[in-house]
Image: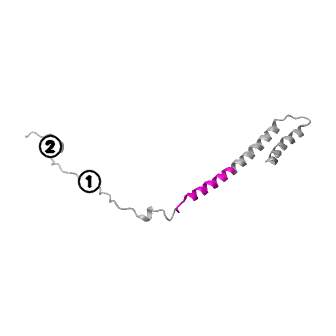
Amino acid sequence: MPIKDIDQIIHGGLPLRRVKTLAKPKPTSQPNPQHILMKDVVPPLSRGDFLNCWKEDRRELEKIRTEKEKIFQENKKLRAVMNTTWSKDWPNEVSKIFKEGKDDKAKT
């Protein structure tokens, strides 16, 4: 019996052959321009469009800030009324607190 080589032992006497893969290579196709262009969907935007939207948002933000400030001032008056102690002249003090806010509006 002849001495077996390590390769012969591993392969069991079968000759080496190259294994071909069954997977086919993916074709490299060009994308369809109709599907990648957004000209019809998104109109071209200019700097003016952006600035107009920005100014509109700023106006809305200022409007919300003024409303928030009014609510804050009203809550501040109500808190001042709640912190006053009851006395004979309590109604005069309360009316004075509410009148202060009206005087501020008349000044501006």
The residue type indicated by label 1 comes to: Thr
Question: Which disc number belongs to residue 21?
Answer: 1
**Can you identify the residue that label 2 sits on?**
8
Judge left or right: residue 34 versus residue 104: left
Judge left or right: residue 40 versus residue 3: right
Judge left or right: residue 105 versus residue 91: left
Q: Is residue 51 magenta?
A: yes
Q: Secondary structure at mark 2?
A: helix
Q: Which residues fall within the magenta stretch?
A: 43-62
Q: Secondary structure at mark 1?
A: loop
Q: Which class describes the residues within 10 Å of circle 2: few (<14), some (14-19), or many (20+)?
A: few
User: Viewer-nearest of labels 2 and 1?
Assistant: 1
Residue 50 at x, y percent in the picture:
57, 56
Which residue is at a point 68% across and 50% down the rendered structure image?
62
Which residue is at a point 87% across and 38% down the rendered structure image?
93
Mark 2 or mark 1, earlier in chain: 2
Q: Residue furthest left?
A: 1
Which residue is at a point 44% across and 63% down the rendered structure image?
35
The residue type indicated by label 2 comes to: Gln
- Which is the main secondary structure of the residues drawn in magenta? helix
